[in-house]
Image (spheres, grey):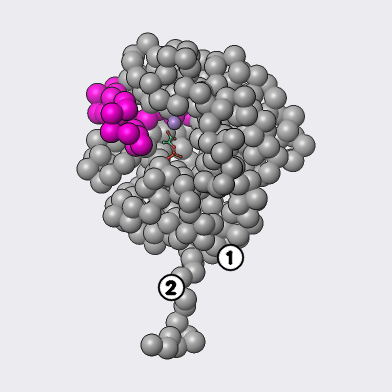
Amino acid sequence: MNRSSQEPDPALPRRVLRPARPAGTRVTVGAVEVGGAAFVVAAGPCAVETPAQLSEAAAAVASAGAHLLRGGLFKPRTSPYAFQGLGEPGVALLERARSRHSLGLVAEVLDTEQLASLIDHVDMLQVGARNMQNFTLLKALGKVRRPVLLKRGLAATFSEWLLAAEYLLDGGNEQVILCERGIRTFESATRNTLDLASVALAKARTHLPVMVDPSHATGNRELVIPMALAAAAAGADGLLVEVHPRPEEALCDGAQALTPDMFEDLMRRLPAVLHAVGRSLHARPVPAANVRVL
Ligand code: PEP
Ligand code: MN
């Protein structure tokens, strides 16, 4: 069948491309804006494990200057025998950390059933790499009014990633942030291969903010700081970083978790790199207890 030359090509994204919003999109997550001049850092454990683990992690990342707290409640694990996450009972732990430290919350939603238990409790819903082409989930998230962090699929091309974002915008949700987290290549020395060229390309071709996850991209805590700094230099709008108070005890992704000291070091080193590319670190949201009502 011949398509008329008038019809747009269905294989090409439309709404996510830069000409649709030349000035760029800014996405408000909790008390911070992603996609402006200021760089935003989301940090926290791969998975919410225990009350003590989460409260220590939240205190550490907040005092080092993070803006958002990440923590998975529902974990997409390769093995069915691995820790699957605390599920809904973990929501209260995240909410306590948010109110103590003024940290917006980012958590992954694996399917449409979990959406109801997360939507009113987190500030941004994460779509994991394994779910980038879960079109039923993308359509459901297109209908909600909550920011979505869309991870790039393990083996997704740049254009497949953009078309997945297109589902969200086409469904009516314009609060979308792309997240590069490494792709699978022939290289086995690192967990994945961090594709920073696609970060620069996404910034040029789309109007969406782009974050980088150097933790899943490398799988090795020694590589996280250099890749996080490189992401900032490449034009990313923010980071999603795994931090655990005691990585050796982590139930998930311990090898790539930064210790609190390493995270502090990263936060100390980021401003100089950001300054070199005309950006700055976002101000820390003021804790509610310190806001004086005049
Ligand atoms: C995560 O952020 O914890 C996660 C599972 O990431 P990804 O979907 O990128 O593997
Ligand atoms: Mn993880």
For label 2, the residue is: 10
x, y percent for residue 93: 33, 20
Say which residue appears at 46% left-offset and 70% top-offset.
Answer: 11
Quadrant position of ligand 2: top left
Tell me the distance, in whole angstroms, between the alpha carbons under discs 1 and 2.
17 Å
As displayed, is residue 235 above or below residue 227? Answer: below
Front residue (pair 255, 173): 255
As displayed, is residue 155 above or below residue 275? Answer: below
x, y percent for residue 245: 48, 14
Q: Secondary structure at mark 1?
A: helix
Q: Is residue 154 left or right of residue 19?
A: left
Q: Which residues are magenta?
A: 67-92
Say which residue appears at 67% left-offset and 21% top-offset.
Answer: 268
Q: Main secondary structure of the magenta part?
A: loop
- Residue 214 in view (yes/no): no
Lower sequence index among marks 1 and 2: 2
Q: Is residue 111 left or right of residue 154?
A: left
Q: Nearer the viewer, mark 1 or mark 2?
A: 2
x, y percent for residue 166: 44, 60
Q: Judge whether residue 171 is colored magenta.
A: no
| Residue found at the very far right of the displayed protein | 276
Front residue (pair 208, 129): 129
Front residue (pair 24, 262): 262
Q: Secondary structure at mark 2?
A: loop
Q: Judge whether residue 75 is colored magenta.
A: yes
Image mark for residue 19: 1
